Amino acid sequence: MTLVWLPFDPAELGDPPATFDYEVVPSVEHVPASVRDVEIFVPPYSVGPEVRDVLPRMSSLRLVQTLTAGVDNIRDAVPAGVQLCNGRGIHDTSTAELVLTLTLASLRGVPGFVRSQDRHRWDWGWHESLADKTVLIVGYGAIGAAVEARLAPFECAIVRVARNARDGVHPISELSSLLPDADVVVLVLPLTDETRGLADAAFLGSMKEGALLVNVARGPVVDTGALVHALQAGRIRAALDVVDPEPLPEHSPLWDCPGLLISPHVGGSSSAMWPRAYRLVRDQLHRIARGEEPVNIMSGDY
């Protein structure tokens, strides 16, 4: 029978295929004896170097199903001939909620309210609204679409950008002409050779004065040095769920930049994640058991 390694109890899947064997492997720091027999591997949510190290030992491996949307930290370690599937659909809800949280908190001055509360001070003032703003979503996949759905009631204009043009979506090649008109720029694209350092000095310099950059993609999509310079100059503001490097070192200049809100890479870390993770893994296993093509197969750069 096909052996499946899961990082959680298979009972969480409800009705997983009965034709498969399951072994709970919450961590591969201690590698089970069945390492040569496992055919389908669902790594833990947090993929560390130990996952990369164990992959070459899985001589029967056919498919790796991650619980993350991004696979940049594991992709090059997956053996040739083994299918790699990402967790597209698991984090749409949670990450889109965080985009809205970071955007509204930044525009409405919530970090300042918290600091004033800590000092027992009643600091009244005017702040910006999301209403009437133009929001540029860079990376219009499943999460980008989920972001748009949650922005819809806020009376703002949405501009969509993806790798390639399609109906209602601009190609990334037009980004430089779109940035100057955006009040909020949301980065939701995967980390690839093409997107690494995308938000560089030229990108940030093209943004509207006072615009807000929201990054829930990957830290290296943004040039950290260029961002620090832009923030210290007061040209733009930013809200980052991801940074480069992670975790952010204690003495990084980012911590003290004005107009910056940082969350510690928690886009997918909410109660919404696990029900969607279980559903995706269950449906994927049933698809494989029926001899069908898996979903979310990673091919090319994406």
Image (cartoon, rainbow, N blue to C red):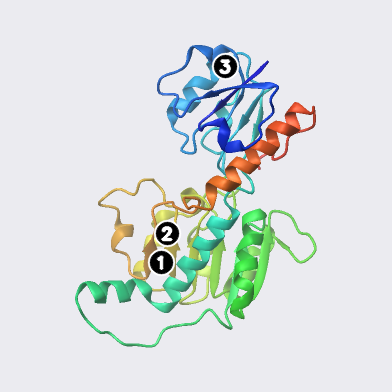
**Which residue corresponds to mark 2?**
226
Q: Which of the labelled discs sits on residue 153, or is there none?
A: none
Instruction: Tell me the element at label 1.
Output: helix
Residue at 74% across, 29% down:
288
| Total labels drawn | 3
Give the amino acid type for the residue marked by disc 1 in the picture.
Answer: Ala
In the displayed structure, 238 sits above or below 71; it is below
Residue at 66% across, 61% down:
145
Q: Position of residue 238 (x, y in %)?
A: 43, 66
Q: Is residue 297 among what the camera can see? A: no
Give the amino acid type for the residue marked by disc 2 in the picture.
Answer: Ala
Instruction: Tell me the element at label 2.
Output: helix
Residue at 56% across, 37% down:
12
Of the two numbered discs 3 and 2 on the same chain, state the one appearing first in sequence. 3
**Which residue corresponds to mark 3?**
58
How far, Cα to Cα, is label 3 from label 2?
Answer: 42 Å
**Which residue corresponds to mark 1?**
230
Between 236 and 116, the one lying in front of the other is 116
How far, Cα to Cα, is label 3 from label 1?
Answer: 46 Å
Cβ–Cβ below 8 Å for labels 3 and 2? no
Quadrant of the rendered image containing residue 283: top right
In the displayed structure, 269 sits above or below 114; it is above
Residue at 30% across, 57% down:
253
